């Protein structure tokens, strides 16, 4: 054990139950889990979810927590939003098989770097690719929950308008949450009325919808590996300091 | 054994190789890092071992390449649950680099271009178990995987194998690095599932 680090309580596996499920898109669902001994968390943190087969085989994967915990009759509830990975081992189970009331083991909160603290007053830019919106949405929801006035800008890259996770809520918050701007980039098919051709997030998008480097924003980039690599490189190229760009890479391939 | 998840059987398993607990096999090479990928030029690259008394030992890229090279074939284990077996690397053993370094230190803090740090007991860098690796699968190590050179310490979780490694500070006292300060385990033995503080 290191000297000089505060002793921390071990983060134990505990049994959570599925209390509700919401369909977000054709391939993504939000699972509301009741976790009786949940210790609380910061926006951006994740949980590990562990499945056990009857023969004892186990599989665990990480899922970002989608928002602040809420109270429920059986204890605190947290939400995760799972995107189905075709041929995946865990995500198809969570979406297609895992049923209301079923138990699952979770461990968390985990991750102490890709987090936003509401005390931090720097402007925030969020850049999401696909299900990478999940931990960024947690930040947007936490901002609202604590009544923060820190200006936020979100750039959300999706294939088509049908792939936008939290579409209704983002529309509402983009309108009602003062100081939150939401911009979309469509990579496959743009909806009517959107100006421009489908494309991947580029310099122009980040220039137009992000904060200039002089404002020294804190930037959070989350999505598939290739997306995160490309966006982080763009931001560094624009002059943003590397240490103010935090990244979370979901999944092995980009 | 944990509680059984109704209806979960897992991927079809035939003769699973021995993996550390909680790990699954991948053929991909996932990328996990906390920020943008640093790009480091070979002209300015250097590797520095600084001893606890302040003495520094430096190698330029050419000097590193002129040292005896090894080609370890190792299994690697990431704390995010994937393992990859039989990966092939080329690099310089830490035994070679530490040979002639006068130290009584027990701990090492590896540090990287880009500011990343991670701590290890110095003994874990000796005995043919650690390298400064610059080649993966026969090709120069890509930047997103830590090129031009990364630490390779396959017997510990892979976050200990600091990407874009720039040097090692030898210390008489252990000092937690980047992820360790953010809640990850100080040692990180995959076979004992030392993922987070307190494991
Ligand atoms: C910190 C962290 C937070 C995460 N948060 C979320 C989240 O909020 N929501 C979410 O849906 N996922 C999230 N993920 C990804 C998640 O942990 C799993 O990797 C994902 O659900 C796939 O698991 P699986 O068992 O279904 O697929 P696997 O059986 O692991 O993989 C099946 C195949 O799909 C490929 N693959 C694996 N993962 C991905 C991926 N993400 N994208 C594309 N291809 C992939 C594999 O290479 C393999 O070929 C997060 C990952 C990390 C590290």
Image (tube, coloured by chain):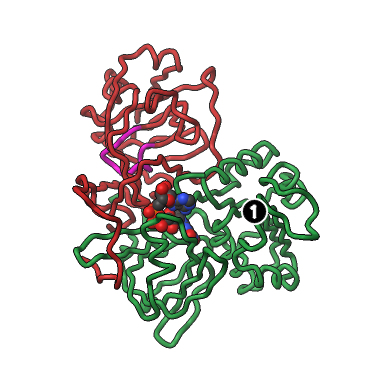
Chain colours: A green, B red
Q: For this view, does A108 lie left or right of residue B22?
A: right
| SS assignment for the magenta stretch, majority | loop
Query: In the rendered image of this protein, does residue A103 appear above or below residue A72?
Result: above
Q: Is residue B173 visible?
A: no
Host chain of mark 1: A
Q: Is residue B57 left or right of residue A156?
A: left
The stretch drawn in magenta includes residue B33: no
Span shown in magenta:
B152-161
Q: Residues within 10 Å of mark 1 (few under 14, many from 20)?
A: many
Q: Nearer the viewer, residue A6 or B118?
A: B118
Quadrant where the C terminus of chain B is found in the figure: bottom left
B160 magenta-colored: yes
- Which of these two is toward me, A231 or B169? A231
* Figure quarter occupied by ligand 1: bottom left
Picture coordinates of residue A81, whole percent (x, y)? 50, 66
Q: Which residue is mark 1?
A: A157
Q: Is residue A83 left or right of residue A99?
A: right
Q: Does B114 sit above or below residue A15?
A: above
Which image quadrant for residue A230?
Answer: top right
> Along the line of sight, which residue is nearer the eye, A84 or A250?
A84
For mark 1, give the secondary structure: strand
Q: Measuring from the top left, give residue A124's x and y in whole percent.
A: 66, 56
């Amino acid at each position: 054990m290191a000297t000089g680090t505060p002793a921390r309580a071990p983060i134990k596996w505990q049994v959570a139950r599925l209390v509700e499920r919401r369909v977000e898109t054709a391939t993504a669902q939000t699972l509301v889990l009741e976790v009786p001994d949940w210790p609380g968390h910061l926006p951006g943190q994740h949980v590990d979810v562990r499945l056990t087969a009857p023969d004892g085989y186990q599989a665990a994967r990480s899922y970002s927590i989608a928002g602040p915990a809420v109270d429920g009759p059986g204890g605190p509830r947290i939400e995760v939003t799972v995107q189905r990975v075709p041929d995946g081992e865990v995500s198809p189970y969570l979406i297609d098989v895992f049923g209301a009331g079923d138990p699952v083991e979770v461990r968390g909160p985990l991750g102490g770097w890709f987090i936003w603290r509401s005390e931090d007053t720097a402007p925030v830019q969020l850049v999401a690719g696909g299900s990478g919106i999940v931990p960024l949405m947690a930040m947007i929801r936490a901002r609202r929950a604590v009544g923060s006035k820190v200006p936020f800008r979100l750039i959300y890259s999706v294939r088509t308008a049908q792939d936008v996770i939290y579409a209704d809520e983002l529309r509402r918050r983009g309108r009602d949450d003062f100081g939150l701007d939401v911009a979309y980039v469509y990579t496959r098919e743009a909806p009517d009325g959107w100006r421009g051709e489908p494309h991947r997030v580029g310099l122009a998008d980040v220039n137009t919808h992000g904060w200039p480097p002089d404002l020294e924003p804190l930037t959070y980039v989350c999505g598939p590996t290739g997306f995160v690599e490309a966006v982080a490189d763009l931001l560094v190229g624009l002059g943003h300091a590397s240490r103010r760009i935090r990244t979370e890479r979901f999944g092995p391939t980009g | 054994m944990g509680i059984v998840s109704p209806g979960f059987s897992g991927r079809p398993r035939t003769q699973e190789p021995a993996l550390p607990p909680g790990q699954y096999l991948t053929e991909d090479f996932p990328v996990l890092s906390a920020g943008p990928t640093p790009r480091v030029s070979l002209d300015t690259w250097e590797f520095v071992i600084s001893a606890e008394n302040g003495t520094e030992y430096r190698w330029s890229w050419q000097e590193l390449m002129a040292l005896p090279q090894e080609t370890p074939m190792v299994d690697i284990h990431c704390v995010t649950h994937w393992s990859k077996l039989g990966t092939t690397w080329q690099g310089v053993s830490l035994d070679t680099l530490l040979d002639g370094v006068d130290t009584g230190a027990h701990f090492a803090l590896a540090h990287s271009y880009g500011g990343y740090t991670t701590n290890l007991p110095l003994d874990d860098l000796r005995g043919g178990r650690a390298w400064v690796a610059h080649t993966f699968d026969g090709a120069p190590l890509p930047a997103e995987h830590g090129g031009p050179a990364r630490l390779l310490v396959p017997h510990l979780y892979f976050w200990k194998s600091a990407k874009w490694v720039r040097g090692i500070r030898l210390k008489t006292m252990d000092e937690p690095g980047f992820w360790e300060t953010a809640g990850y385990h100080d040692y990180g033995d995959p076979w004992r599932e030392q993922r987070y503080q307190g494991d």
